[in-house]
Amino acid sequence: MGNPKAFLSIHRLEAGYRPLNDRLNDFGEVEQTLNIKERELQASRCMDCGVPFCHWACPLGNKPPEWNDAIYKGDYELAYKLLNATNNFPEFTGRICPAPCEPSCVLKLSCNEPITIREDEAAIAEMAFQEGYVKPHIPENRNGMKVAVIGSGPAGMAVADQLNQMGYEITLFDKAEAVGGLLRFGIPNFKLNKKVIDRRVDVLIEEGIKLKMNTPVSLKKLPKGFDAYCLCTGAEIPRDLPIEGRKLKGVHFALEMLSQQNRILAGQTFKASEKISAKDKHVLVIGGGDTGSDCIGTSNRHGCKSVTQVEIMPKPPKGLNPRTPWPQWPIVLKTTSSHKEGCERKWCITTNKFIGENGKVVAAELEEIEWLPAEKGKRPEMRKTGKKETIPCDLVLLAMGFLKNPEITYPENVFVAGDAIHGASLVVRAIADGRKVANEINEYLKK
């Protein structure tokens, strides 16, 4: 390492977010960046820890000590080569990955100031594109075999990229109008500018990957002419809430609003009757995860009157959780940039019913619940307490996750990757699984 003792004198410094009153007026990315000197200082904090648990915690097996050393020495070209060796799309993960590597950093354990691994990763990717280190690598030899990848989210993109570099002819299918899956149609622009996706797609096209967008594919009737297929269609069934009033106007799945907003920003138009807008409304977000947080940020940018987010699980502890000790992923209270923009958060709350007038939702009845300790071999039991309240809401967004797809047996030349097989998870895990399945396809076709 260039400076193995830098962590003793240099503290962790995050780039932070754009000012609140500034970012609420647009859908531009909220996260700021450090200057080059500050970034090199942050990278210098990466100590010679001997056993890098960050590498252990990363689903991709990234090697932060190696590329942080390269950043510290100002060699961004080397840093990108090291990073890209394990991660096809660091410009995505550097923006939206929750960075399981950071809570596993030895400096998290010793002084609660882990390395800014995710931000360092984003800085490497941006410098690589800016300086022209990202270049199309066109395979010199094709092996004559063709693979169809169905679904162009992060898993599908990773499968396509890996197999294309191995010499296969790749066609990437998607029912949507553009590549990206939930990267494009789920994650708000204020977290991931879609030009970042377009920039990478341009490289993939130059490398020889063929795209067929606006092309729905039936899993029972796959396109002919391919030696193998990889299904990367994601987990598309949102968890519903079948209670009284569910059919009222104004009750939507979160992704209905999020995907529509992203399409509007891309230039698409919708009829007034089709638009899902939070402007001048009281918004209720059901679900305490990242999708719920995205709904809060989007609603505030629409100009809502208020946002309330309810979660059925208990409120996690702040800071440290003895039940998830280092180097595990800590189950602790998470406050996102969207939460800081304004909302009320409630835990241990279930929704009993939606109340409507003239066919439109106007309120929701909530009830406090408690979780009883699990008996041996059983799950904790939820019990209603009888403490109810009715809150006004003109817009309800269901952000309770996605159901896992039913298991289906496919022919031996059909593979499945990402959320389509494992259920909804992180982008970094989708990329990692795409790389893994690409190797499995290669081994199968080499037989």
Image (spheres, helix red, strand yellow):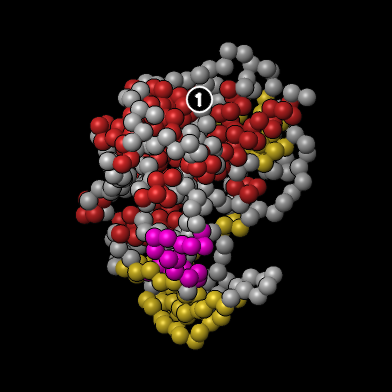
Q: How many marks?
A: 1
Q: Residue furthest bottom?
A: 386
Looking at the picture, tell me which residue is in the foreground, 424 or 198: 424
At 65% from the left and 47% from the top, the residue drawn is 421
Looking at the picture, tell me which residue is in the foreground, 209 or 221: 209
Q: Specify the segment rendered in magenta.
A: 308-324
Residue 384, horizontal then vertical, whole percent: 53, 82
Image quadrant in which the N terminus is located? top left
- Dominant secondary structure, magenta: loop
The residue at which mark 1 appears reads as 205
Kind of element beneath mark 1: helix
Question: Can residue 141 be seen from the camera position used here?
Answer: yes
- 151 lies above or below 72: below
At 77% from the left and 46% from the top, the residue drawn is 409
Looking at the picture, tell me which residue is in the foreground, 223 or 301: 301
At 69% from the left and 27% from the top, the residue drawn is 442
Image quadrant in which the C terminus is located? top right
Residue 420, horizontal then vertical, whole percent: 63, 47
Looking at the picture, tell me which residue is in the foreground, 91 or 119: 119
Tell me the quarter of the picture where residue 196 sits: top left
- How crowded is the residue under tag 1: few (<14 C-alpha within 10 Å), some, or many (20+)? few
Residue 313, horizontal then vertical, whole percent: 50, 69
Magenta-span inclusion, residue 128: no
